Image: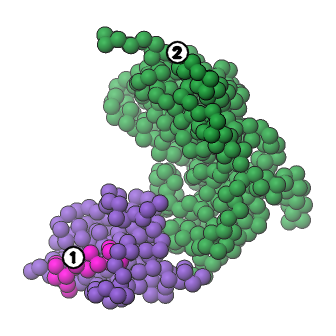
Chain colours: A green, B purple
Amino acid sequence: MIATEKTTEENGAAQAAVAAAWDVERVREDFPVLGQTVNGKPLVYLDNAASAQVPRIVIERGAKYLREEHSNIHRGVHYLSQRATSAYEGAREKARRFINAREARECIFVRGVTEGINLVMNAYGRKVVREGDEIIVSEMEHHSNIVPWQMLCEEKGARLRVIPMNDDGELLLDEFDALLNERTKLVCVGHVSNALGTVNPVKEITARAHKLGVPVLVDGAQGAPHLKVDVQDLDCDFYAVSGHKMFAPTGSGVLYGKAHLLEEMNPFIGGGSMIRTVTFERSTYAAIPDKFEAGTPAIASQIGLGAAIDYLNSIDRAAAQRYEQELLAYATERLSSIEGVRVIGTAREKASVLAFVLGDVHPHDVGTILDQEGIAIRAGHHCAQPVMQHFRVPATARASFAFYNTKAEADSLVAAVQKVVEVFS
Amino acid sequence: MSELSELYQQVILDHNKKPRNFRILEGANRVSEGMNPLCGDQLTVYMLMDGGVVRDLSFVGTGCAISKAAASMMTQAVKGKTREEAQALFGEFHRMVTGELDESSEPNHLGRLTIFAGVRDYPARVKCASLAWHTMHAALEGEDRATTENLGPELTHAE
């Protein structure tokens, strides 16, 4: 949602109202990492799309687990094992509610979206995809939602089809309709683009795919931190979440899958916990979710994810979203006013991701100079090389905002980019 | 901005704006491609090797200011050197940018290349400065491709 046409005064007043409804300074106190200085300047952390920061309650919940509750889960008969199991399964229920899945067993704990997508590729894709079949991805996908499908297509002799996007970074749904056919076995699409910020109409995409009986996997890495996710409303068949993008520790994440699909899928990783019985003649597999949780999981991290969900539930998420949108609009407008800046990713509906190029200054140089000002952005292809190819750039500089970033930080970003212009003039 | 000016010195900015030997070399008998997958720096080094001497050297490519300036100054430094001298220069440059060689106290042949010494304080940019050198080195060895991946732990500083 780029700013609509209002006067500067109306805009200012509207922004002030939103800012007032969202006490960002109070929220910043929840995130210990934000208070530090970098290269003598206050840290301006604008790399949230790469990884978000973690609130104190998540740090303390993880520390408490390790300090007081830790034990291996699921099979112990002793007290600590039961406490650990209860905390772990409690986190699973929190995840269920967070994305509004019907059942907790539909929420498989994984270490992130990449693992979740590879799970679906191996356990579902390898089972149902045959030679001559087709898998549809979109032009703006992160490599984690391209490469596994390429691997599968190569293995099976199947074909990867790509939904194109326009130069604003919006998917062309008519082209999607044309790609769907009786050979399509799966549609894989990102909820929100990490490179462009585009929010994709995944509910509509799912509806169209389902008309032909084609299941849909949604990469929710950037969706979960910015949007309210309701998998029943979306009706998608799989939805993957990365914990570290949504204020939780690294190593946490959830793959949601509809129960009937997960039940039919082959196992992915084999080992302990995912079995029912084991003999050397054959082994039988456990029911979901255990079937997909072999070995000892990242217990502390997933409990941390539960705490992050608690934190998100404790704030007014709708207000946070409005605040992020105002920040995005403000930063976009100010940055665009610098001569030589071209914003990459101008969809009508965007999350607070602001990618840009600056004349012929390489994003790497932009990033280094910004770093000297204490500003953390990401420069590169953002694991989305096809996006770079579409816009004919080697890389972009990307500032990504969370609800703990401020208008002053957006001003710092703009001032630093102006400094880059000076250095390279 | 004093630390930054150690990296983005006038000479480096100048070489970035007007890179020397920035062209395809007709008649090159060694061609090598290098890329930095992390950020998209990409360049091709063209070399004319004759009688054990680098008779001519050029490069084309896209990349950040550090990679372009390093490539430009590399072609100036290596042109006319023997294979052995070019190898030695590669070694010294590499050791300098990874902090293993103190160019101000240890004997070396780096000359104006010491301008890149500041890169060692920017671990993320070491690969940018080294790319052209690794690519040139691959051309010396008769290899076709160089990449700054799998170049071992010596190219990345400890986290």
Q: Position of residue A364 (x, y in %)?
A: 50, 67
With B82 as the anchor, is A257 left or right in this view?
right
Q: Main secondary structure of the magenta part?
A: helix
Q: Is residue A114 above or below residue A420?
A: above
Q: Position of residue B94 (x, y in %)?
A: 32, 73
Q: Position of residue B30 (x, y in %)?
A: 19, 70
Q: Position of residue A395 (x, y in %)?
A: 50, 61
The question of residue B89 being in magenta is answered with yes
Q: Which residue is mark 1?
A: B87
Location of residue A129 by image quarter: top left
Q: Residue at x 52, y 15 (%)?
A: A287
Taking depth in this image into account, of A280 and B109 the one nearest to the observer is: A280
Taking depth in this image into account, of A424 and A39 the one nearest to the observer is: A39
With B89 as the anchor, is A1 left or right in this view?
right
Q: Chain of mark 2?
A: A
Magenta span of residues: B80-97
Disc ID at residue A287: 2
- Rounded to the nearest whole Å, what is the CA distance between mark 1 and mark 2? 61 Å
Q: Is residue A240 above or below residue A278?
A: below
With A249 as the anchor, is B98 left or right in this view?
left
Location of residue A149 by image quarter: top left
Q: Chain of mark 1?
A: B
